[in-house]
Image (cartoon, helix red, strand yellow):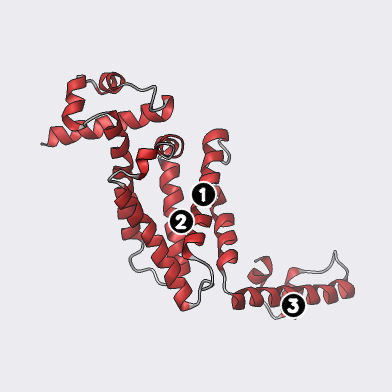
Amino acid sequence: MKDQLSTKENILKTAEKLFSEQGFSETKISDIASLVGISDSTIYEHFKNKEGILFAIPKEKTQEIIHINDQHLKGLVGAEVKLRKLIWNYIDFLAKNREYTSLLIFELRANRDFYDAEHQVLIRQFIQEHRRVIMEGQTNGEFRPDMSPSLILHLIFGTIDLILITWLVENKPSDPLALFEDLFDLLKHAIAPDALKKEGEDKRKKILDAAAKVFSEYGYNKARIQDIAKLAGLGDATMYN
C-alpha cells in the first residue's frame, strides 16, 4: 500500500510539472508515465483518465493549505490578526508552489469541469474560513458591517490573482510576499469602520497642524519628526504610519 501511495504522489508531482510547463492539452499520459518511470497502464490503476489527474492536484493542495491554516490560527485573537495570517499563508503557499500556481490560474480555472469537481467542497471550506473571520470582524467592530463579506472576499482574492499573474508572467516582484504589507494595508483601509477612518483623519490633521507650526518656527531643514510628534501629542511611529 505504501508503494502505491508513493507512486500516486509521484504521478501527481510529475503531472503538475508537465501541465504547468507545456499545458494540459499538450501533455500525454505517456509523457507522465515516462518521467515517473512506469507504464501507462500503471497510471490508469490510480486515475480514471488525464482529467482525473488534473483535478486530483488541487484537491491535494487545498487539503494542505487548509491544514496549514488550522494550525496557524490556533491561539490567535482578533479578526484582523486572523485575516492577516490567512492572506499571508495563501500567498506564501502559492509562492512556494509556483508550478501549482501556474496550473491553477492558467489551466484549472479555464476548465469548466473544474467548478463541478469533487475538490470544490474543499475549496468552499477554504473560502469559508476567510468568510467566518470577516464576519467576526464585522460583528466585533473591527471591519465595517455594511460591506458584503462576498465583496470583501472578491477584493482579497481578485487582488492576489493579479499579483500572482504578474509574478508568473513577468517575474515581478520576484517574491509576491514583497507586496503583502501594501496589499493588507490597502485592504485594511477599505474595510475599516468609519470610526477608525475618522480617527486616522484626525491624527493626520493634528500632524499637519503641528508641522506647520514647527516649520514656521524652526524652518524645514531644522525641524525634526520628534518635534512635530511631541506638539501633536503622538508617537514617532504614528507619524510614519
The correct choice, above or below, for 59 with respect to 84 in the image is: above
Q: In the shown orientation, is residue 124 left or right of residue 2?
A: right
Q: Do the residues labelled 1 and 3 touch (CB within 8 Å)?
A: no
Residue 85 falls in image quadrant: bottom left
x then y, percent, for residue 64: 31, 48
- Marks 3/2: CA distance? 33 Å
- Name the mark on residue 160: 1
Question: Which residue corresponds to the image point at 63% horizontal and 73% vertical from the top-left?
Answer: 197
Q: How crowded is mark 2: few (under 14 residues within 10 Å), some or many (20 or more)?
A: some
**Residue at which label 3 appears:** 206
Q: Quadrant of the N terminus?
A: top left
Mark 3 or mark 2, earlier in chain: 2
Q: How many marks?
A: 3
Which marked residue is nearer to the observer: mark 2 or mark 1?
A: 1
- For badge 1, the amino acid type reads Ile
Q: What element carries label 1?
A: helix
- For badge 2, the amino acid type reads Ile
The correct choice, above or below, for 187 with respect to 196 in the image is: above
x then y, percent, for residue 125: 33, 56
- Name the mark on residue 87: 2
x then y, percent, for residue 178: 55, 48
